Image (cartoon, grey):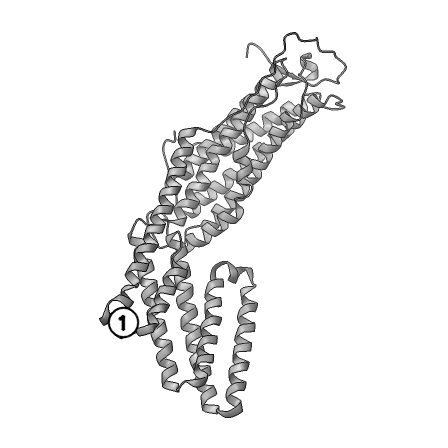
């Protein structure tokens, strides 16, 4: 290179010449309005579609009451079909399918066990009848509630266990004053109406503009690569302005997107759980590695936190930087190049996940080279015994930039492992 720009790390002894006609400027950044409008319109459209689908399901299942031939077959038990539609129909197809299957399994097991307990109590008769019913309700209620507290059960089968307890209790208690044959008939009729409601929910959810939790999770994770890359690029631009200008300007880069990522863990876990219930379609198989998406989301959140810290280093300084000889400075151009390389790596990884194909570029080797370069910058710079707060902020910035490189290396490994587990095809060119 013909010239070398430097970041001066001073001890605060130099004086800054007074400035004349200094005008305060307020700088703020707004996300692209068009993209926000498109995103909001998409969300609103999905909400409208979901609402219409629920209305269609309720209208179809109400035919059990409205049409005399159907009502003669199911009678008052049609209310169970309507209840099934109301409590089962969820926003995404995976959530509806998972909740419906949970309700079906809970109803079958609870109804079957409840009928057995009710018949056994009736055969014993007398005081034994009440003892059997009370003891069975207590035992199943206690055991079922205990199992609901296990994280692995609560994550996927909580609703099913709750329905099992509810159905078992209703069947057992209703069988106190009902004949043996009548208990079985009630259980079968309720099960059939619940199945009717479930079938209507699934058909409407899967066949009429289906909304997939897998698509939402995939798109959400992919978009974070681009957003984090944009935030880091804005941070590096502010860094260059901060260390190269003598004007006193506060950083104007926006980090609101990175802040929003910090609270995305629970949403990711819910979407991944729903995605596991969804049927095979497109490139998403039955055993697609959604857990790896959760791991990538964790690393992206950690990366977003480091970028927030980078922005904090710039925002912490209130006075201007001063230029010193090269022997007492941290070189700027290597840091700029490293920042650009990280941004490029994040966008390549995001594009790889978006296209669901392996990235041809050897990102791992490039990141390894970047890590060596920033270690060289740190080792050849005077960043010890710092008194000046601005100098301390920039020194912290350089060290955090090293942490960003290390975190992107970890992210690259996770994306490569996802490609192997999901059998991503090779992609010759990524733009």
SS label for mark 1: helix
Q: Position of residue 74 (x, y in %)?
A: 30, 73
Q: Quadrant of the N terminus?
A: top right
Q: Tell me: residue 15, above or below residue 393.
A: above
Q: Is residue 129 above or below residue 65?
A: below
Residue 142 visible in rendering: yes
Residue 360 located left or right of residue 28: left
Residue under the image location 38 percent in, 46 percent down? 47
| Viewer-closest of 6 and 393 | 393
Instruction: Give the percent coordinates (x, y) of residue 359.
Output: 42, 35
Percent of width and height locating residue 371: 58, 29
Q: Quadrant of the C terminus?
A: top left
**In this rendering, does residue 360 appear at all?**
no
Q: Which residue is mark 1?
A: 71
Nearer to me, 93 or 385:
93
Find residue 173 and report its horizontal and vertical position in percent: 47, 80
Q: Residues within 10 Å of mark 1 (few under 14, many from 20)?
A: some
399 relative to 421, above or below = above
Q: How many marks?
A: 1
Q: Residue at x 43, y 82 (%)?
A: 175
* Image quarter of residue 401: top right
Q: Quadrant of residue 101?
A: bottom left
Q: Residue furthest left?
A: 69
């Amino acid at each position: 290179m013909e010239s070398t720009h430097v970041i001066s790390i001073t001890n605060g002894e130099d004086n800054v010449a007074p400035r004349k006609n200094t005008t305060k400027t307020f700088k703020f950044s707004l996300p692209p309005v068009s993209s926000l409008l498109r995103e909001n319109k998409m969300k609103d459209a999905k909400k409208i579609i979901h609402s219409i689908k629920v209305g269609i399901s309720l209208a179809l299942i109400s035919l059990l009451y409205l049409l005399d031939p159907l009502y003669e077959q199911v009678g008052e038990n049609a209310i169970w079909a309507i209840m099934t539609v109301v409590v089962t129909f969820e926003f995404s197809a995976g959530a509806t399918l998972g909740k419906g299957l949970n309700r079906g399994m809970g109803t079958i097991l609870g109804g079957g066990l409840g009928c057995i307990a009710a018949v056994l109590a009736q055969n014993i008769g007398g005081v034994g009848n009440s003892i059997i019913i009370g003891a069975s309700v207590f035992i199943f209620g206690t055991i079922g509630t205990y199992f609901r507290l296990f994280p692995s059960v609560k994550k996927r089968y909580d609703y099913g266990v709750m329905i099992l307890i509810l159905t078992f209790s209703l069947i057992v208690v209703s069988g106190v004053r009902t004949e043996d044959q009548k208990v079985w008939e009630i259980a079968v009729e309720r099960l059939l109406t619940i199945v009717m409601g479930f079938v209507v929910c699934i058909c409407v959810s899967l066949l009429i503009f289906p909304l997939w939790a897998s698509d939402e999770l995939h798109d959400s994770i992919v978009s974070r690569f681009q957003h984090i890359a944009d935030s880091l690029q804005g941070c590096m631009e502010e860094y260059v302005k901060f260390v190269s200008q003598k004007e006193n300007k506060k950083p104007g880069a926006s980090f609101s997107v990175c802040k929003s990522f910090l609270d995305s863990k629970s949403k990711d876990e819910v979407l991944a759980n729903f995605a596991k219930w969804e049927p095979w379609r497109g490139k998403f198989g039955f055993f697609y590695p959604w857990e790896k998406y959760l791991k990538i989301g964790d690393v992206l959140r950690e990366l977003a936190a480091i970028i927030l810290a980078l922005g904090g280093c710039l925002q912490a300084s209130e006075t201007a930087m001063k230029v010193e000889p090269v022997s007492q400075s941290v070189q700027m151009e290597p840091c700029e190049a490293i920042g650009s390389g990280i941004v490029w790596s994040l966008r390549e990884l995001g594009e790889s996940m978006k296209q669901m194909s392996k990235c041809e570029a050897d990102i791992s080797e490039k990141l390894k080279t970047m890590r060596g370069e920033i270690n060289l910058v740190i080792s050849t710079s005077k960043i010890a015994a710092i008194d000046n707060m601005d100098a301390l902020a920039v020194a912290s910035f350089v060290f955090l930039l090293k942490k960003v490189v290390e975190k992107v290396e970890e992210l690259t490994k996770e994306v490569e492992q996802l490609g192997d587990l999901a059998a991503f095809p090779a992609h010759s060119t990524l733009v």
